[in-house]
Image: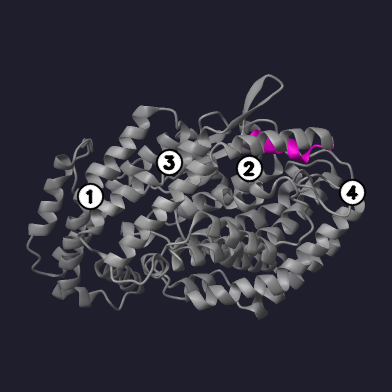
Amino acid sequence: MKIEKPPRKFLSNHIEVDSWEVIKPYFDDLLNRSIENKIEFEKWLSDRSELDAVLEEDLAWRYIRMTIDTKNEAFSEAYSLFVTKIQPELAPLDDQLNRKLMQSQFINDFKSNDAYRIYFRSVETQLNLYREENVAIEAFLNEKSQEFGAITGAQTIEHEGQQITMQKAAQFLKEQDENLRKQIFDKISNRRRLDVEALDKLYSELIQKRHELAVNAGFENFRDYKFHALGRFDYTKEDCFNFHEAIKTLIVPLVKDIQKKKLDKLGKEKFKPWDAEVDPEGKAPLKPFKTGKEMLDGTVAILGKIDPYFSECIHTMNEMGHLDLDSKTGKAPGGYNYPLYEIGVPFIFMNAVGAQRDLVTMVHEAGHAVHSFLSRDLALTGFKNLPSEVAELASMSMEMLTMKYWDLFYSNPDDLIRAKREQLEGILKILPWIAQIDAFQHWVYENVNHTIEERYAYWRKLSSEYGTGLTDWTGYEDMLETSWQRQMHLFEVPFYYIEYGIAQLGALGVWKNSMDGFEKAIENYKEALKLGYTKSIPEIYETANVKFDFSESYLKSLTDFIKLELAKL
């Protein structure tokens, strides 16, 4: 499909955001403009939406370039310029625009429309949270949190005379040669030890500043502040705690059973840390592809079998240069799909090294990308600004839906079964980690003055509760107690993590529906994604024909389903 940026109706098409002064006139226009009727109010909303889209896309490209090449000082400085010089100037004027919006007499003409009602609710939340003294703190946090990517992006180890990224190194932990696995694990551990102190210091600084931000806004702690900032209108912290307990009760024992069977096959009583990813039957690691291009071509083919529109989306992104897929030195770790609200074509960033996990990441991010395409024509930028529980439903459902066609990557039936088993077992394994990370964050911000040793001690306690006790960490205790440092979300997007668990349950529901009627399940999935954020989260899930539910009873029904599907493999 051919996509170009829509012609701007408010901003100049040639504007270059290199200073605050360039965009200030547009804010002044919106603030000073007289609104005499409903049509003028609608035009004002549209112009503000365009301004939001342009600025968010400008920031997005700065972030994308910086994460692709963390060593490039110009990219880092461009990002820093925006978050330290431009955003602080934007914040008070954004607040004034929000006040003008909510005080308008014409707002009542739109409140009967769900899309506008939800948008106005988000604006009201921003108004309630805004404090002038927090502008400088926000700028500090936006810049400071990016140090995580710079620190971890520089981590490499030497292997056979070459410097390789941590992502590539991790692939060797799947090899059958235990001596090689131990050697690689030792190198990874030693390299990570070099940054433990820096990451501890960084996290401590972020915690203190986030707490200051929350107190300024009238909250007891950053957790309570963040629940409001994330727009968690449909569940509470108590729901999260209940979810944690349900994971301990239902999922941890299942993971323990899986691990015991694996230990029996390995002929061991306990794993060593370098045994976690090795195939217990002596098989080589799954390698669905060799190059990023091969992965991309296979993904496009799979998506085309599900729905031709899905493959068109990724093909279009590739044609436009909106993909950066291969792992390389100096690149920030992880993967993401970054929405670009003006052009409506997102960007996928990841670190592929030829592993099955990379295939899953690719289709996960493709789910996000398809979501961006399906919601790109919504009237306002605010309608496309998704809550994570909805965004992750799109991506995690795509993981499950593509399993039907993974034979395009695996011609060997045994490998295909292994890949599917790895996916389902992986879901069970990741749920305790999601709950542990979430529980950790609740404690961190409820006990903001904790020491680093207390932080380690609490993480060890959680590791005992959410772990199976089947790994012998002797000699590597420090690697266990600092394992939280590998979770980017703690540093860059605090409290954004439990959404993966909530959405995983929704995705399992979408997958279950697809087995009863594939075309109908895809139709419901697409209709849900087209909504953007113009309905409540439960209503969007309902449109996809799944429940917005993460209670123990619902979790049990889905884990019983997974057990049945695993038994078929």
Using the image, tell me which numbered label, if any, was put on residue 88.
Answer: 1
Q: Secondary structure at mark 4?
A: helix
From this viewpoint, is residue 569 visible? no
Q: Is residue 275 left or right of residue 9?
A: right
Residue density around tag 2, few if under 14, some if 14–19, many if 20 or more, within 10 Å:
many
Residue density around tag 3, few if under 14, some if 14–19, many if 20 or more, within 10 Å:
some
- Give the camera-side residue of 29 and 374: 29
Q: Secondary structure at mark 2?
A: helix
Are the residues flagged by discs 3 and 2 in contact, CB closer than 8 Å? Answer: no
Using the image, tell me which numbered label, if any, was put on residue 147.
Answer: 3
**x and y percent of residue 350 in the render?**
55, 40
Using the image, tell me which numbered label, if any, was put on residue 299.
Answer: 2
Going 18% across and 57% down the picture, which residue do you hit? Answer: 92
Going from N to C along the chain, the mark reached first, 2 or 1, is: 1
From this viewpoint, is residue 213 visible? yes
Going from N to C along the chain, the mark reached first, 1 or 4, is: 1
Q: What range of the chain is rendered magenta?
A: 167-176
Going 27% across and 77% down the picture, which residue do you hit? Answer: 111
Going from N to C along the chain, the mark reached first, 4 or 3, is: 3
Going 57% across and 47% down the picture, which residue do you hit? Answer: 486
Nearer the observer: mark 2 or 4; the answer is: 4
In terms of image quadrants, where is residue 168?
top right
Residue under numbered circle 4: 266
**x and y percent of residue 134 in the render?**
25, 58
Please count the marks in the image. Answer: 4
**x and y percent of residue 566 in the render?**
81, 62
For badge 3, the amino acid type reads: Glu
Dominant secondary structure, magenta: helix
- Give the camera-side residue of 222 and 38: 222
Q: Secondary structure at mark 3?
A: helix
Nearer the observer: mark 3 or 2; the answer is: 3
Going from N to C along the chain, the mark reached first, 3 or 2, is: 3
